[in-house]
Amino acid sequence: MIRTMIGPLLHGILALSDGAKNPRLNPDTITGSVTLFTLLMAIAVIVGVVTKKLKLPYTVALVLAGLFIAIMKQAPSGTELSPDLVFFIILPPVLFRAGLLIDVENLKRHWVPVAVMTCVGTPLTTFVVGLVLRWFLSPDIISSNVVWVAAFMIGAMVSPTDPVSVMPIIRSIPLPKPVRTVIEGESLFNDGIAVVLFFILYGALFMPIQSTGGGLGPNQSQPVITADTAEHRHTIQGTDVSMSHGQKHGAVVDIWAGILKFLGHTGIGLCIGAIMGWGAVCLMRWANDPVLENTITVVLAYGAFLVSDIWHVSGVASVIVAGIFVGVLRWSKDNAKESERTIIPFWESIDYIMNSLIFLIVGFELQFIGVDQLLDSTVIMASIAIFLAMQVARAIVVYPSGYLLGTWSPRGGTVIMWSGLRGCVTLALVLVLPDNIDGSPDQLKQFVLPVVFGVVLLTLILQATTMRPMISLLGLPTDPKDA
């Protein structure tokens, strides 16, 4: 049966990989886009059925399927990963669903360890990875006078644990509530810190001081990218960034300005999410129609992100808070039972579709990066070194925090340490780097892209597949009192 399904599927992939020969299969057309979406979901369905039988993590199986298609050089055209795809299509529903269903009582009870993992763990990972990566950045890759800035920028790039990668794995494994809450909370809230750290360092590397007066442009809270290679400029949400390594023109990284900007952007984003979430709850109570309420939540998830982007503030914070508001306020009423029964399966389905798309596309990315680049000895060594540095940084935060706060045992700490999966957020940030500088290919991006992709693959394939065996081996209890 599976063979009869795979045959037409492979034929469809072959046809879509050369959509120029058939306009109806061109992903730039509406028909081609629908065909591409249907094909990707068909692959996801087959992978889902197979993983149910083989008891493999679904997301890992999707990545492996994407890698296999990429190695065969049959990835459909139009499936290249982009920052806009990640931040404007994939993240809003994933974050909203997480905020909608997060256990708020447990989050309030364990907010201190979540804050420690987010506010201490993210900068520490940036620092440790930067220290290690510095020795792989030769002068032909990056100018020596900004090499440390570049190293720490890449450290910030790989510092956030990815909610898209973490959530599906954690939901399928029985864990103590404190451990689960910390893992989920960290993956939700550390993206904002990592993105701000990345753009502070990005500004120091590429932006002359006279364009911003600091090093972080006023519109850099979210990475929306367009490249104007004719004039050798790079635009991030309207901020014009000169692209020339080592030409800082006296640029200074104003850390305090960056921190204040981050706090301001996050605070305004939280307010936007709260206001829109409260308004959506009022509409849902007034409508009292589960189908209409589902539509309202979709508008809220994407609308909160888009409104925050228009105001150049944190869309991540806005969407999470909007989801929490709906989850806490809408279901507190007696007449919300039917709504709850409808909305949860609805958002589970959307979450499943988004995860299916992004993990297949992550696998396809190998075709656009190139197998030869990924298997380069320096790239392999750098990827392994960064992977080990990330584990060391997490261990430095996790084990002392568990001991001092008394929130988890060493066994629970081991699971938290090993749960730091990376994914589409990290890949989106590396794609922010300019393709060209002064008319020539950027050597930094050419080196960093396969290295970061290798790190993401290591976390998804190695860590995700060993989470369940590790928990069984550790004998981690599911009773929160024993965590």
Image (tube, grey):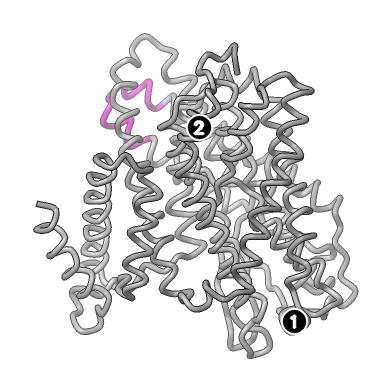
Give the residue at x 50% y 32%.
99
Looking at the rendering, which quadrant does residue 363 occupy?
Answer: bottom left
- Could you tell me what secondary structure mostly forms the magenta stretch? helix
Disc 2 residue type (three-letter):
Gly
Q: Residue furthest right?
A: 250
Residue 452 location (% of width, % of height): 59, 63
Give the residue at x 47% y 46%.
164
Q: To which residue does mark 2 refer?
A: 99
- 383 left or right, relative to 330: right
Q: Secondary structure at mark 1?
A: loop
Q: To which residue does mark 1 refer?
A: 244
- 140 left or right, relative to 294: right
Q: Nearer the viewer, residue 54 or 79?
A: 54
- Residues at circles 2 and 1 in contact by the CB criterion of under 8 Å: no
Which residues are the magenta region?
283-296
Q: Residues within 10 Å of mark 1 (few under 14, many from 20)?
A: some
Give the mark nearest the N terminus, 2 or 1: 2
Q: Residue furthest top?
A: 334
Residue 126 location (% of width, % of height): 74, 53
Give the residue at x 45% y 44%.
465
Q: Nearer the viewer, residue 443 or 172?
A: 172
Answer above or below: position of 427 versus 435.
above
